[in-house]
Image (cartoon, rainbow, N blue to C red):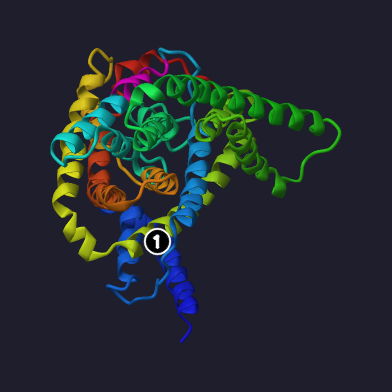
Amino acid sequence: MDIYILDLLVIGLLLLAVTLGSGWIGRLPLSYALIYLVVGVLLSPYGFNLIRVRPDAQLLERLTEMVVLISLFSCGLKMNRPIKAWAWNSTIRLIGFLMPLSIFAIAAIAHFVLKLEWGEGILLGAILAPTDPVLASEVQLYDPKDRDELRFGLTSEGGLNDALAFPFVYFGLHWLEDNSWQNWFRQWVAVDLVWAIAAGLAVGVLVARGVCWLEQRLEKSRAIDDLMEDFVALSTILLSYSVAELVHGYGFLAVFVAGVTMYQGCKSADRSASRLRFMERLEKLSEVGTILLLGSLLRHAPMLRFAGPALVIAGSLLFVIRPLGAWVSTIGSPVHPSTRWLFGWFGIRGVGSLYYLTYALGQGLEGETGELIAWLTLITVTVSVALHGITSTPIMQWYERHVEGNNALEKELPNPD
């Protein structure tokens, strides 16, 4: 019997089940990502052996890259606050303090406990640092009218740290090539840190404004077909990403900024809502394929082999580094104490980490160190998907009943509409 046809049958049944059963699933302590992960394991050689694909690193890199790009733009379209420091207070703290703290804390554990070199530890920290905008739909903004501080902070953090972890990935890769950091540190600061971030910001703004201007000009003479209009969002993603990469900027950052700029600058609430719905559908569909594939890739022999180091890294990151780091980073922030702790818990790792892993593998990460970092990442992502998949629904139900709407910062924010 054709395995491919059976795969299509199972995936079709899965999509039908999660769609028609979404009302029940939404009340259960289960996330869609956890369901897809379990089904992926069941379809692997340890289950029904229906997914036999063993994609190489480059294919996985391109797949996860597109999934992250779609999710980043979707996050950008939900950013409903003015571009002012006070409005993005939580985001600045989570990106400016928590992300570097997480990277170097993981690097320190990897160096002192797992005996990795500092460069390898920083690379591992950068791979695991990004919180995932793809898998965190249960705790992200529902739409641009949502004013909740926890959801805004987590959504904006997920949109930005998938891009801003890149300098640290390059730092680790440079170290692997040459452990005399004095030889390349200045170039890293000038090119990988300053220029690439500035270029990504500029390209995202310019491309989105250019698309909005062109769209508005053309509308005066002839309206765009409604069925084709949502593809403007997809074209903006591809244009901003490719242009940023061509000028050696961070394409992920450009895409997120393009989404923010398009929401802020294209004055059409109906069009923005339509594009957001379109991007979220693409995001959900891509999530299914990616997490099914992750589940099918898991193998018990290497997972048992690296279980000790993986539990050290995953346990430290999820139960110590992220919660305490979030609390320290938000000292003085005018948000509810429960929100500060939930910033620490809701830091799911997922597709972003998988992308950085496959990117590093394609850039020279190999050998025993490459295998170790790969399985540390896969196991940490799996543990994170499981833990957050089980806890996100009950915790968010408690949060909505007892905390949501009481943040002091929320009361200070003017409604942009």
User: How far from the left and from the top, in percent, is residue 124?
Assistant: 29, 39
**Residue 237 visible, this angle:** yes
Q: Residues within 10 Å of mark 1 (few under 14, many from 20)?
A: many
Is residue 81 rendered to the left or right of residue 351? right
Quadrant assignment, res 21: bottom left
The reply to whether the magenta stretch includes residue 362 is no
Residue 23, picture quadrant: bottom left
Tell me where the magenta segment starts and ends, as one range.
Answer: 87-97
205 with respect to 124 (left or right):
right
- In screen coordinates, is 168 left or right of 368? right
Between residue 222 and residue 386, name the one nearer to us: 386
Q: Quadrant of residue 139?
A: top left
SS label for mark 1: helix
In the picture of the structure, the residue carrying the numbered disc 1 is 293
Give me the residue at 38% from left, 56% from top. 291
Residue 27 can be seen, yes or no: no
Q: Position of residue 384 (x, y in %)?
A: 26, 47
Answer whether residue 90 is magenta in the image. Answer: yes
Query: For the residue marked with disc 1, what is the amino acid?
Result: Leu
